[in-house]
Amino acid sequence: MHTEKTEKQKMLAGELFLPSDDELAKERDRTKKLCFQLNQTCPTEIQKRQDIAKAIVGESNGLYFESPFNCDYGYNIKAKDNLYINHGCTILDAGEVKIGRNCLIAPGVVIATVNHPLEASVRSSGLEYARPITIGDDVWIGANATICPGVTIGDNCIIAAGSVVTKDLPSNTVCGGVPAKVLKDNPRK
């Protein structure tokens, strides 16, 4: 017997899906309430903020988000130890976002797994799709950078402020520009 996939199953498989689906809307509402709670919590209430961050993305050691922080689902963000996210970060996590150990994300960074079809008739139907993003260990993403759907950023990579990452970037490099490209090697330390 063939059963049709749910919109969530389509989303997680990287297929076209309708984000207006009731199940997905309820999941986003839950996460947006948690983000609102985080963003309304005093910056000096560190343990409370860490507890809310863990409720958003799951268990991780050394996880800290400055306010404001926003994401869509939270459960698609897979963060390893020692992640620091500075003010004004938005993660559109319809697809999986893997973030390695010891990463720094500067103010105003956008990490977006979701995209819209190029054909206007399909796009106007409300359908969208997501592509996973992988960020390696020891990565520093500079202020106001944008990480686009489907890219991988290698270990020990530095992304310059204002960059737009549209393609994979190799480990041990300093990258920048629009679109981002390798500017120089970043020595291992």
Image: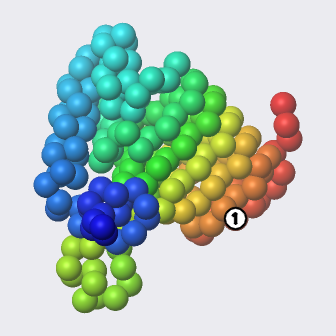
Q: Which corner quadrant of the image does residue 177 belong to?
A: bottom right
Q: Which residue is the site of mark 1? A: 181
Q: Residue at x 36, y 26 (%)?
A: 53
- x, y (%) of residue 57? 39, 33
- x, y (%) of residue 42? 26, 17
Q: Residue at x 63, y 31 (%)?
A: 101
Could you tell me how many numbered marks the image carries?
A: 1
Q: Residue at x 70, y 64 (%)?
A: 181
- x, y (%) of residue 108? 42, 46
- x, y (%) of residue 64? 45, 24
The residue closer to the viewer here, 133 or 104, is 133
The residue closer to the viewer here, 10 or 106, is 10
The vertical placement of 43 against 94, above or below, is above
Residue 182 is at least partly visible in this image: yes
Image side of residue 74 versus residue 164, left or right: left
Residue extending farthest to the front is 1
Residue 108 is at least partly visible in this image: no
Mark 1 residue type = Lys
The residue closer to the viewer here, 13 or 72, is 13
